[in-house]
Amino acid sequence: MASITIRNLDDEIKDLLRRLAAENDRSMEEQARVMLRASVEGQVGP
């Protein structure tokens, strides 16, 4: 499986990701994967 590094992430975004992860009983990494997948799949057309 591939890896990705996100540099220069605003502290505000990191904190929001941490809160969302906690609310969904996920790690920050898992929450980021879920959100990235949903965003990308929502943009893919037929």
Image (tube, grey):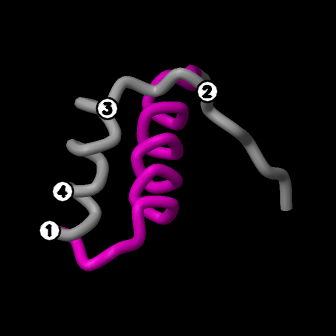
Q: Nearer the viewer, mark 1 or mark 4?
A: 4
Report if residue 30 lies within the magenta region: yes
Q: How far apart are the alpha carbons under marks 1 and 4?
A: 6 Å
Mark 3 or mark 4, earlier in chain: 3
Can you identify the residue that label 4 sits on?
19
Pointer 4 local density, CA inside 10 Å: few below 14, some 14–19, many at least 20:
some
Q: Are marks 1 and 4 in contact (CB under 8 Å)?
A: yes
Which region is colored magenta? 24-45
Magenta stretch: helix, strand or loop mostly: helix
Can you identify the residue that label 3 sits on?
11
Can you identify the residue that label 2 sits on?
7
Tell me the element at label 1. helix
The amino acid on which the numbered mark 3 sits, given as a three-letter code, is: Asp
Pointer 2 local density, CA inside 10 Å: few below 14, some 14–19, many at least 20:
few
Q: Which quadrant would the C terminus be assigned to in this image?
A: top right
Can you identify the residue that label 1 sits on?
23
Q: Which quadrant would the N terminus be assigned to in this image?
A: bottom right
Mark 2 or mark 1, earlier in chain: 2
